[in-house]
Amino acid sequence: MLNNFPLWPVQASTIARSVDALYIFLLIVTGMMTLLIFICLVYFAARFRYRPGVPAVQIDGSHALEITWSTIPFLIFMVIFAWGALVYFKERTPPADATEVYVVAKQWMWKIEHAEGQREINQLHVPVGRDVKMIMTSQDVIHSFYIPAFRIKQDVLPGRYTVEWFRATKPGTYHLFCAEYCGTQHSGMVGDIVVMEPAQYETWMNGGSTGPLSATGEKIFAELGCSTCHRTDIQGRGPNLHGVFGKPVQLEDGRTVTADENYLRECILDPGAKRLKGFQPIMPTFQGLVTEEQVNALVAYIKSIAAAKGEAAKASASAAAPPAQENAQTNALANGSQVQ
Ligand code: HEC
Ligand SMILES: [Cu+2]
């Protein structure tokens, strides 16, 4: 229905409908309040107008009236709050099995790399009906990845990852905007989201890939010497990284954090910020030595070895040791026995 209404952007993702429903509800509530205020205004102006010889009557307040006009708006606001929170959490929580796309923003373009290895600039090709998660960072200032037709917008910050996801429902080409003023050519920092039928998408995917991002990451892992400390066969000077992603890790200062994308990123660029318990603080920083794309590839690689080795780690996990060391040890053992 709304698609024929030219003032309304196309609804092309699963979340678009929910966002629009809430927005329409807000429009109706505010519209009705405005109407109510105008009706009261006109009615009271007429009803209590000045009449010669009739003295004004002073009203000293009414508890019933005050409770009513406090309670009803309160309930309406709570409905908006609860509804808004539901939509927000749905929009903020990427499904676990979503396809991953890495986005690096810079003045003034969007660099996009699929987990499968395809690279694009100012264009993102996705299949219809699949959950797509974008792991985004900026190599200069703050940008914002905004797709009006999908009703999603997320700031893209230098120095950390932010995440955004969608599931496209309709083939077509949609606008991508930068929605955070980022310098003189901010208005030119636009692109296209191309949503294709799955078969068409497969054809597109098969053209011109340099191999999966995780394979690129594995190469970089060796080139930068990460693999000299982070061994996969025996326990090296650094922890074995198999199975680390997504698990809780124990830090030197007693905290326990989850090894998510931001944690891996920080370990590479600022290893001093979160030192792992039970290891010497010998890992050097790679800040300035790696590009954002290389960090993404390394993160994709560490994630990929977590998925592949997850079963082994789960099978032989013992509850006694702290999680991080437990992973390192059981993996070292598992890998050690494979080697022999
Ligand atoms: C000189 C040896 C050394 C090198 C080289 C090295 N690391 Fe480390 N790394 C360590 C040590 C030791 C730790 C644990 C102590 C700490 O957190 O600093 C660690 C921790 C980590 C962690 C956190 C692991 C966990 O289980 O939570 C990640 C991720 C990591 N390194 C990735 C890398 C990557 C990627 C590279 C290459 C770009 C690299 N490291 C190079 C020694 C090294
Ligand atoms: Cu921008």
Image: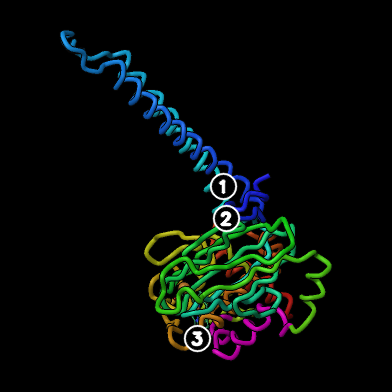
Magenta residue check for 65? no
Q: Which residue is mark 2?
A: 151
* Residue 54 locus on image (x, y percent): 18, 8
* Residue 100 locus on image (x, y percent): 65, 67
Say what amino acid the circle numbered 1 marks: Val
112 over 12 or under it: above or below: below
Q: Is mark 2 within 8 Å of ligand 2?
A: no
Mark closer to the chain start, 2 or 1: 1
* Residue 148 locus on image (x, y percent): 57, 59
Q: How far apart are labels 3 and 2 at the CA level?
A: 33 Å
Q: Is residue 120 left or right of residue 260?
A: right
Q: Residue at x 54, y 41 (%)?
A: 24
- Secondary element under disc 2, as helix, strand or loop, is loop
**Which corner quadrant holds the N terminus?**
top right
Q: Nearest to the eye among marks 3 and 1: give it.
A: 1
Towards the viewer: 193 or 84: 193
Magenta residue check for 223? yes
SS majority, magenta: helix
Within 10 angstroms of label 1, few (less than 14), some, or many (20 or more) residues?
A: many
- Disc marking residue 19: 1
Residue stretch in magenta: 209-230
Q: Residue at x 57, y 74 (%)?
A: 299
Say what amino acid the circle numbered 3 marks: Val
Q: Are marks 2 and 1 in contact (CB under 8 Å)?
A: yes
* Residue 124 locus on image (x, y percent): 65, 72
Q: Which residue is mark 3?
A: 290
Q: Is residue 239 visible?
A: yes
Q: Residue at x 43, y 27 (%)?
A: 75
